[in-house]
Image: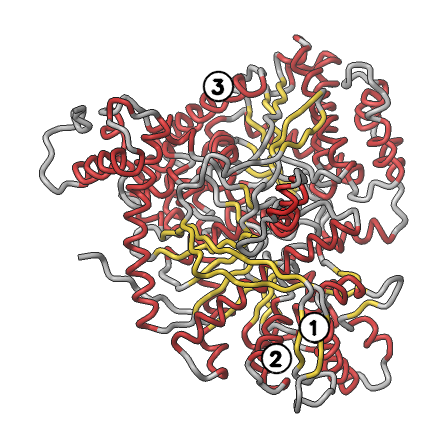
Amino acid sequence: MVDVTAAAPPLPAGSALADLARDVLRNLASVQGVTPERATARDGYQAVVRAVRDRLAQRYARTAAAHDAANPRVVYYLSAEYLLGRQLPQNLLYTGTGDQLAPVLAGLGLSPEQLTDLDAEPGLGNGGLGRLAACLMDALATLDIPALGYGIRYDFGIFRQDFAGGAQVEHPDDWAYDGSPWEFATPELAQEVGFHGWTEPVAGAGDGATARRRWVPGETVRGQASHLLVPGYGTQTVNLVRLWRARAAPGSFDLGPFGAGRYADAAAGIVAAENISRVLYPDDSTEAGRELRLKQYYFLVSCSLRDIVARFRRHNTDWDALPDKVVIQLNDTHPVLAICELMRLLVDRYGLDWHHAWTITRRTFAYTCHTLLPEGLETWPVDLVQRLLPRHMEIIYGINHYFLQEVADRYPGDVDKLRQLSLIQEEPQRRVRMAHLAVVGSDAVNGVARLHSDLLARTTLRGFADLWPARFGNVTNGITPRRFLRLANPRLAELVSDLLGGDGWLTDLDRLAQLADLAGDEAVRRRWREVKHRNKVDLAESLVRTTGVAVDPDALCDVMIKRFHEYKRQLLKVLHVVTLANRIRAGHGGAVVPRTVVFAGKAAPGYWAAKQIIWLINAVAATVNRDPDLSRYLAVAFPPDYNVTRAELIIPAADLSEQISLAGKEASGTGNMKLALNGALTIGTLDGANIEIAQRVGADNFFQFGLDAPGAQAVRDGGYAPWLHYERDPELREAIDALRRGDFTGGDRTGVAPVLDAVLGRDEYLALADYRAYVDCQDAVERAWRDPERWTAMSIRNTAGCGYFSADRTVRDYCRDIWRATPVPVPTGG
Ligand code: NBG
């Protein structure tokens, strides 16, 4: 037998190392059925995951018991997205088994890296909203707040991105194909979810708009639950993310057609049911796609609400106590049907009178808006809702009826006001406005950064803020320093712990402020630079492997990593890259600092303009990297398939963080926080949380440029003419002309023309209006970079100023202002 602890010093019995070695060996035998000699990397992975999972499961059992005993107010987080990232490195850290892993694996001839590579990232989300959900779940557990996140267990998460001829190609993300060992199946929690059908009166219930009714669904699917464990750091609490997967009822496979050789028909019912949780955000450009998406949302909402009610009723009998025990946080408009579903359960199933049910419902929900873009505020055609969810449509009309009465009382005779605020939009098509439903049915509404919350209350949801000012507030987003500093950047984490005399900052991020004084210490700056340099070497190695682009680790590492959207203005960055290339070609190379520009991100499959920009970046990258005159000073790398894991590699290596959205468009941003926390300097507009970052790290340590939100509005209102900027600014003109000639696209002019036509014709996000300010600000960046001591001091001050952006602070704000939830400590195991 292999001694799996051979690499370690003699072990005291019962030591953490001996325990882990014992458990891994046991799991190899009993879970995988292999001897250590025959164990493959996957066997080792399964055995380790099981050992770590067991430790978390024991904590979870104690957590559940503590919550049962306390009967506390529980935070239920409803989100269509979770971007949890890899589970293995996090769970090793949180269970304190990370240090023992290498010696245990050495005995099996395996390395921790081999195991990490096998740990698939569940990509159950798109971007910021999904990653925020994961960061808040982490902070909730770390702060011992009883919480449960509900989501959908998509078979296929966010697509895997690849490039063909520079264009984005989407492949299905079969994340659980080889199993999903962190997941616990809980078939006993299954729920039946109805769709379609009709409603009918209930004897003796009357027949008014708000009377109790019976919904007879025409179709039923089963929601099967599973969960992932979410441990807190430095505490015993383990909360859950509960994911629902759609299944046909058992016995749905039809043997008749199968026997007759009609195999597809035999499985048709199963396929139709399972399609509900098949993919994240099905394409909704067709009627069928729209119905499927609404079905998904209702599926999530219906399973979750019934689960919440069942959990409440285990310990409580009085419905009036529901808002004291339950707070349901609605993330964006996706899960807003939950408001109607709770009304339906209370009125139709439990027989509460409408007004009583409404009082309870409204006090139970809170709504977070994550966008200001109109397309982010969903509306659904009334006839679709009517067809798919007939009872919910009646309930929406009922809610609207009483709400519009309230509006009419407040603004007598003001028909416009009624039209503006109604839950139903009448023109050009009758649609249900989900954001309006969310505000009317919630106790609290918040944006995710100061500016965003102000704009919400002053513009997008103005009429509601006038009605109920106290309902509106702000909670600025945050990020978990455990994943995004400690795990992603172990070198910097170690240096910080060394400088601060311990790792207390991991749960008290404000302690980073003490680093500011050390920015003046030359020895500290040297160590800081060394860490950054080593991270850049790692990134360079990875970029060569994934993109073939060789980059110089000494060059300024300039990163723009985020989803592709025109408002985020990746195109403005392209114009800057072309401007630099033009300067080099004009013989001013010596005046340009060597720079590596790293782009990463995905575009929504149906978003043509964004995909065109991806293609353009790849073309520019190929041109620059291939030209020896340019590549002495400039490299452009665009590694495909950006996800949490890749973010964790790029962020620690970044010197410069591009946060250049048009002011007023980015709700908050969280990538901006991750980069600043890791010592990158931001070049950014006065948008979203950039403003708060600049305040915290100090204006001297932040490269701010461009129009602010009112300025952008004024440009719009003043009859914006983008081509005037083209005419007046020679560098801009030369950049656009070079692109139009095909100089940066291998001679191709057809692909680039529509991008340029859009920006010269309409330029919806004012890229040309901000171009000069942006390029000048980049010149200031270069001046600062030339003085490494100054740059490093600025970098240290960025990290020092980021304490506020801990997700722990965000959760404390939510607990204080919205959730009114308090910690329930979980005892350590005996
Ligand atoms: C995003 C916003 C970001 C914000 C995150 C988290 C979506 C739909 N919205 O600005 O664009 O930081 O939400 O709040 O992902």
Q: Nearer the viewer, residue 545 or 781?
A: 545
Locate residue 442, reporting x and y percent: 61, 72
- Which residue in the structure is indicated by mark 1? 391
Q: Which of marks 2 and 3 is nearer the N terminus?
A: 2
Q: Report how far apart the C-alphas of labels 2 and 1 lie in the structure.
A: 10 Å
User: Residue shown at 45%/23% (left/top)?
Assistant: 538
- Is residue 209 visible in the rendered image? The answer is yes
Residue type, mark 3 in image: Glu
Q: Quadrant of the N terminus?
A: top left
Q: On screen, 71 above or below 588? A: below
- Which residue in the structure is indicated by mark 3? 541
Residue 736 figure quarter: top right
Locate residue 6, reporting x and y percent: 16, 25
- Which residue in the structure is indicated by mark 2? 348
Q: Which of 389 and 615 is in front in this view?
A: 389
Residue neighbourhood size for the residue with mark 2, other residues' Cα within 10 Å, grouped as few (<14), some (14–19), many (≥20)? many
Q: How many marks?
A: 3
Q: Report how far apart the C-alphas of labels 2 and 3 lie in the structure.
A: 61 Å
Secondary element under disc 1, as helix, strand or loop, is: helix
Residue neighbourhood size for the residue with mark 3, other residues' Cα within 10 Å, grouped as few (<14), some (14–19), many (≥20)? some
User: Residue shown at 38%/72% (left/top)?
Assistant: 72
User: Residue shown at 30%/64% (left/top)?
Assistant: 825
Q: On screen, 317 above or below 623? A: below
Q: Marks 2 and 3: CB-CB under 8 Å?
A: no
Locate residue 28, reporting x and y percent: 27, 33
Q: Report how far apart the C-alphas of labels 1 and 3 lie in the structure.
A: 57 Å
Q: On screen, 73 above or below 162? A: below
Q: Earlier in the sequence, mark 1 or mark 3?
A: 1
In the image, which is nearer the foreground, mark 2 or mark 3? 2
